Amino acid sequence: MSVATIGGARLHYDDHAPDGRSGGEPVVLVMGAGGRGRAWRLHQVPALAEAGYRVITYDSRGVPPSDPGEAGLTLGDLAADLAGLIEHLCIGPCRLVGTSLGALVVQELLLTRPDLATAAVLMATRGRDDGLRAAAARAEIELLDSGITLPLRYHAALQAIQNLSPHTLNDDVEVSDWLSVFEQSLSTGPGLRHQLAIKPDPGRLAAYAAITTPCLVLGFADDLVTPPHLVAEVARAIPGAAHQLIHHAGHYGYMEQPEEVNRRMLEFFRGVPARPLPRTSRAAPQERRVTSP
């Protein structure tokens, strides 16, 4: 794992070379609120590397071990971090993949720094909060502020119900595996609160009409956190965006239905011409190297 200082914030990232070769067109994967970049390693990183892409994953500001950030963190801040990381690695323009909050960050970058992107896959995204999603975010922030710590088993069960498809929840073997994962991956700390407080500007949905980067918008049919109708609004707002729905998948559809997600992602990328790689594919010597835990 490597560290880059972007706009005063220290971001931890991993740079995965394509299978059996050097170089490769770069793809940056952007995780959702409180999520570690390593969550992409199980399914998306291997698929992209096998297809010949150079894959960069990172822990966004607010997610340990990257800096926690401060109260008032915005989508603009996270998009600037993403732009800074791309420039630090000298990999722009590149392909981008984001899920949930990560997709909102990518959308913001497509508006503010379109020169850094050639194509984008946006999963479980939205352009606004409806009443229920806004209330759920407020409730989660209030719980964090209360200082109450939920038992890990309760947290795991709640995470499963909120983020997985009934297709998964009705399989006792799969549920057991997921509960074990959730019990070991509780997100906490001030950075999580800062990210949970981020919400899309209601007027930003209309602004997506200015996006010119080719986009694939993926919704998950059983997603309770970002339901398909909110995803569809983003697809309609972005000119020319492809919109697809993946069944038997909840908010974590990229892990529940990884083969289908990867197939559609790679098929979309194959349809977007690659731009020549920059002469320098890396930035100046990295600040330092650390060992991934």
Image (cartoon, rainbow, N blue to C red):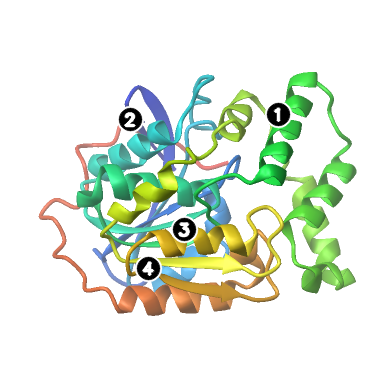
Question: Which residue is outermost to the left?
Answer: 279
How crowded pointer 4 is (Cα within 10 Å; few <14, some 14-19, many 20+) is rated as: some
292 relative to 176 in the view: left or right: left
Comparing labels 1 and 4, the label whose residue is closer to the camera: 4
Q: Earlier in the sequence, mark 3 or mark 2?
A: 2
Q: Which residue is label 4 attached to?
A: 241
Say which element carries label 1. Answer: helix
- Residue 253 place in picture, x, y as percent: 63, 65
Q: Which residue is label 3 attached to?
A: 234
Q: What's under tag 3, amino acid-wise?
A: Val
Q: Which residue is label 1 attached to?
A: 141
The quarter of the displayed image where residue 141 is located: top right
Q: Earlier in the sequence, mark 3 or mark 1?
A: 1
Q: CA distance from mark 4 to mark 2?
A: 30 Å
Q: What's under tag 1, amino acid-wise?
A: Ile
- Labels 4 & 3 near each other (Cβ < 8 A): yes
Comparing labels 3 and 1, the label whose residue is closer to the camera: 3
Q: Would residue 35 be seen by someone viewing this image from the given angle?
A: yes
Q: Earlier in the sequence, mark 2 or mark 1?
A: 2
Q: What's under tag 4, amino acid-wise?
A: Ala
Q: CA distance from mark 4 to mark 3?
A: 9 Å
Comparing labels 3 and 2, the label whose residue is closer to the camera: 3
